[in-house]
Amino acid sequence: MSKRRKDGRDDIQSVGEAIRSMLNSYQLTTKYDEATLIDSWERVAGRPIARRTKKLYIRNKVLFVEFDSPTMRHDFSLYRAQVLDMFKKEFGPGVITEIVAM
């Protein structure tokens, strides 16, 4: 996809840039980033944690994680800060600010 510059020449834009530009123009960037973050839960948090996760959702930049047992919720609380840091490194600091285990 190309854009016309003021001087009449075409600027070539990568597919990723074009998609990001479209998301910005329709104000969907935040929702896209949130959906991508939730889809990457198993990869970032790890398979053992993901298998014990019942539900994930984001509200007001807070990721809520529901586990299938109180023991798993407690175990995850020991690693919550590390998982949050990994998400911030991958998605930037603005997508989520906190993780709440339920």
Image (cartoon, grey):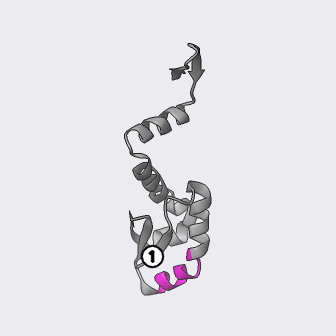
Q: Which residues are the magenta region? A: 71-80
Residue 46 seen: no
For disc 1, the marked residue is 100
Q: Is residue 29 magenta?
A: no
Main secondary structure type of the part rendered in magenta: helix
| Residue plotted at (56% across, 55% down) | 91
Residue 30 horizontal/vertical position (percent)? 43, 52
| Residue plotted at (50% across, 32% down) | 18
| Residue plotted at (38% across, 44% down) | 27
Residue 10 horizontal/vertical position (percent)? 57, 17
Q: Is residue 79 magenta?
A: yes
Disc 1 packing (10 Å; few <14; some 14–19; many ≥20) = few
Q: Give left or right: position of 18 versus 55.
A: right
Q: Nearer the viewer, residue 25 or 75?
A: 25
Q: Amino acid at mark 1?
A: Val
Figure quadrant of residue 6? top right
